[in-house]
Amino acid sequence: MTNLLAIVIPLGPGELDWRELLPSLLSSTSAELTVVHTLGAAPADLPPAQERLNRVVSRQGRAAQMNAGVAATTAPWLWFLHADSRLSTDAFGRLAQYLAGSPVGIGYFDLRFLDDGPSLVRLNEWGARFRSRWLHLPFGDQGFVMHRDTYSALGGFDESLPSGEDHALVWRARHNQVPLLPVGAEIWTSARKYRRQGWLGTTLSHLAATLVQARRFARAAASR
């Protein structure tokens, strides 16, 4: 995947989970890595820019950071990862197979949770699988991968939104009949918020936000 894939990783203020993700990517793939942080908010131990690692400064907001990361890259394929993402052992092989087919659409991974939260998050995993595979609503923590032309045709991520930029992109894809395709590998993310905030309250809060955003973004996509 040399020179074919650019991986874009936005860093939020005080985010430290990149310390596990970045070394894993540097040792497991030859893809171009781009880490995007805000001005004055770069972690002190973030590695300096090097041959395969770009550092980009952006204004605050995940949508703005991801768009800035794309603008700083040239590879035809784009892979957006959250800093707390962890990849399954077969992720790179499955992704290579997926890209070899030159898919026209947005690829996503099957979401799993790390063992740092309540065991009930296994139900959330099944919910995410149902949401993405049957309702065709994957979210950004599932590692969106798409061709640069698809990203451009959809207008990138909406920087006017305070949140839900991934959800809005999916609705624009659906409205424009851009397929949402499973890569066929798992991506892991932290379940700490379910432990801190409570499983039931966090689950219900996410469900309510999803329903509100779905109505809003579906109308917005249809009006573009």
Image (cartoon, grey):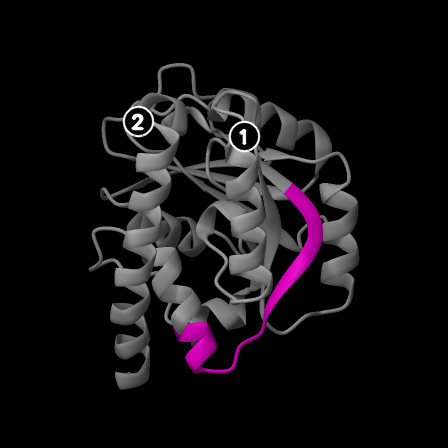
Residue 9 rendering spot, x and y as whole percentages = 46, 40
Quarter of the view holding residue 104: bottom right
Closer to the camera in the image, 136 or 80: 136
Q: Is residue 103 visible?
A: yes
Q: Secondary structure at mark 1?
A: loop
Q: Residues within 10 Å of mark 2 (few under 14, many from 20)?
A: few
Q: Residues within 10 Å of mark 1 (few under 14, many from 20)?
A: few
Q: Residue at x 39, y 57 (%)?
A: 166
Q: In this rendering, would 94 be left or right of 72?
A: right
Residue underneath mark 2: 197
Q: Earlier in the sequence, mark 1 or mark 2?
A: 1
Q: Is residue 1 above or below residue 115?
A: below
Residue underneath mark 1: 50
Q: Is residue 32 above or below residue 218?
A: above
- Give yes or no for contact between labels 1 and 2 (Cβ–Cβ under 8 Å): no
Residue 159 rendering spot, x and y as whole percentages = 25, 58
C-alpha separation, residue under disc 1 versus residue under disc 2: 39 Å
Which region is colored magenta? Answer: 172-186
Viewer-nearest of labels 1 and 2? Answer: 2
